[in-house]
Image (tube, rainbow, N blue to C red):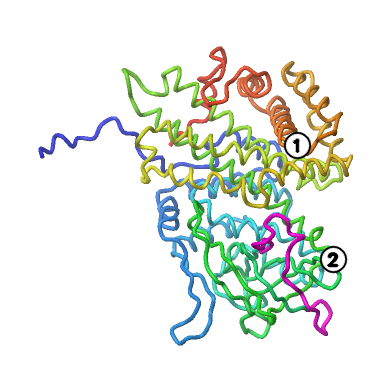
Amino acid sequence: MAASTHTVTNQAPPLVGYDVFTSDRALAEAVERHLAPELLTEAREELALLGRATGSAQVREWGEQANAHPPRLLTHDRYGHRIDEVEFHPAWHRLLGRSVSAGLTDAWGRPGGHVRRAAGFLVASQAEAGHGCPVSMTHAAVPALRAEPGLAAVWEPAALSHVYERELRPVAEKPGALLGMAMTEKQGGSDVRANTTEARPLAADGEYVLTGHKWFCSAPMSDAFLVLAQAPAGLTCFLVPRVLADGSRNAFAIQRLKDKLGNRSNASAEVEFDGTTRAHRVGEEGRGIRTIMGMVAATRLDCVLGSAALMRQAVAQAVHHASYRSAFGGLLVEKPLMRNVLADLALESEAATVLGMRLAAAYDAGTPEESALLRISVPAAKYWVTKRCTPMVAEALECLGGNGYVEESGMPRLLRESPLNSVWEGSGNVQALDVVRALRTEPAALDALLREVGAARGADHRLDRAIRGLLVELADLEGIEARARRLTERLALVLQGALLVRWAPPEVADAFCAARLGGDGGAAFGTLPHTLDLRALVERARVVC
């Protein structure tokens, strides 16, 4: 075949060699908005350093390698000793080491830590989302550990460390440690009160042995895990170390690894506790759900941030492709209908980012009012943002046409990953029912939400009308469970709209209020009113390499 037939034209160059943080205007503005001025210079430098690394060809290659070479279970060593280890590709360790060294497990011990950490998590997840799992759980374990000060004194400094060490050793001998979680059992799923794993107390105070199984244990090579088990006084939270203080391995049998739709680089395992598995009680007996809920809430926020990261990467790829690809006599990005699609995708991405970063700022504030806002807004955001992720990523893939359906584009990996955050840490019904529970039992949560959206009242008539409609929904809790999804969706949309009206450029807020609150938009992406400033929305989302 003649070489002239292989001349390559009209292809977009790879989207590499750029700063993932600085090029994301919505994210960079959120960091500036929510951090104290004296923290901004250092935070920007840290995040730009991480952003340049994440956008580099090398780190993108690590992400591809980690995904292409899934973890492998090693139950025994060459001599027949049971070891129960998981082998990862070196790229996985490089990604994990970079994120830990960037402070993505260190939010609780430094000023503005949650905003800085959330922004970094959103950036790093765009290289490869799977490695975010142990990062997220290590970060989220800290509030649960604090229910047991003796354990927190040992494990919290290791969790907050910026040093990643992969070897399994006693925590006292490691400069840093990772923590995981194992709550779900095969007979119960989200209903953890149905757990059957038993905890038998030993003579030493707070020491137990466990017997049972866990259907999902995330990141099984972590140094310790928070688990739920039935103690004499009821369901209780425990810390299960992989290696005991004397250097011996704890009884922690990995039965198999899950073969998952996406999240291929990360190991999710089924594990067994054989009646000799040592565990330390965390908090009071019988108060396990209350103890571990601090961890669950933090990981739910990371589900929001992780979905926002997938959205941002998807829209960046779509806009980049359309900015170089020509069809029907001009660049795709200049075609009115494609511009409408890209603008709609950019709108969804920015709304997710702004909401996730606002909730991270609430963690930093730590006031009773902000904690009450988190109580209702985290499950609502987790419900809505994670559900919007899959259709949004699918539409972004379609913007690349057949090129987007090919593995080399990276878009199929994003699409396979996109349903994950809606399933993990409680699926949609669990989140919606948690919102209802907050409405029924914690009046301060609703008060905090209404104050938050009330700060934007009077700025846009469509938002004002949506707030009034939400109040009508909230006034009647009859049959609330059957309409919990409807209510949670409206709550999340009103909250996003209020935040965008307050902080986003006028063209972004106008488009959101028109399409998401005013009813002037369709069910599919690309149905924004043509009278909006769609060009400005697309330009705001564009990455400049």
x 70%, y 44%: residue: 429
Above or below, comparing residue 124 to residue 95 in the picture: above
Distance in Å between CA atoms under marks 1 and 2: 30 Å
Q: Note whether residue 42 is visible.
A: no
**Left or right: where 381 falls relative to 205:** left
How packed mark 1 is, by other alpha carbons closer than 10 Å (few <14, some 14-19, many 20 or more), is few
Query: What amino acid is found at the position of numbered circle 1 in the picture?
Result: Ala
Percent position (x, y) of residue 497?
Answer: 70, 27
Secondary element under disc 1, as helix, strand or loop, is: loop
Q: Are marks 1 and 2 in contact (CB under 8 Å)?
A: no
* Residue drawn at x 60%, y 78% as measured from the top left: 169
Q: Position of residue 367 (x, y in %)?
A: 84, 46
Work out whether residue 500 can be spotted. yes
Depicted 412 relative to depicted 449: above or below: below
The residues colored magenta run 181-207
- Label 2 element class: loop
**Residue 300 horizontal/vertical position (percent):** 68, 49
Q: Amino acid at mark 2?
A: Gly
Mark 1 or 2: in front is 1
Name the residue beneath numbered marker 2.
Answer: 286
Rendering coords of residue 478 (x, y %): 85, 33
Q: Quadrant of the image for the C terminus? A: top left
The secondary structure making up most of the magenta span is loop
Question: Quadrant where the N terminus lies?
Answer: top left
Residue 65 higher or lower than 164, as above or below: above
Q: What residue is rendered at 47% in x and 22% in y?
A: 339
Please report the residue visible at 81 percent of the width from the left and 48 percent of the height from the top.
366
Front one among 275 and 356: 275
Residue 482's disc number: 1
Mark 2 neighbour class, 10 Å CA radius: few under 14, some 14 to 19, many 20 or more = some
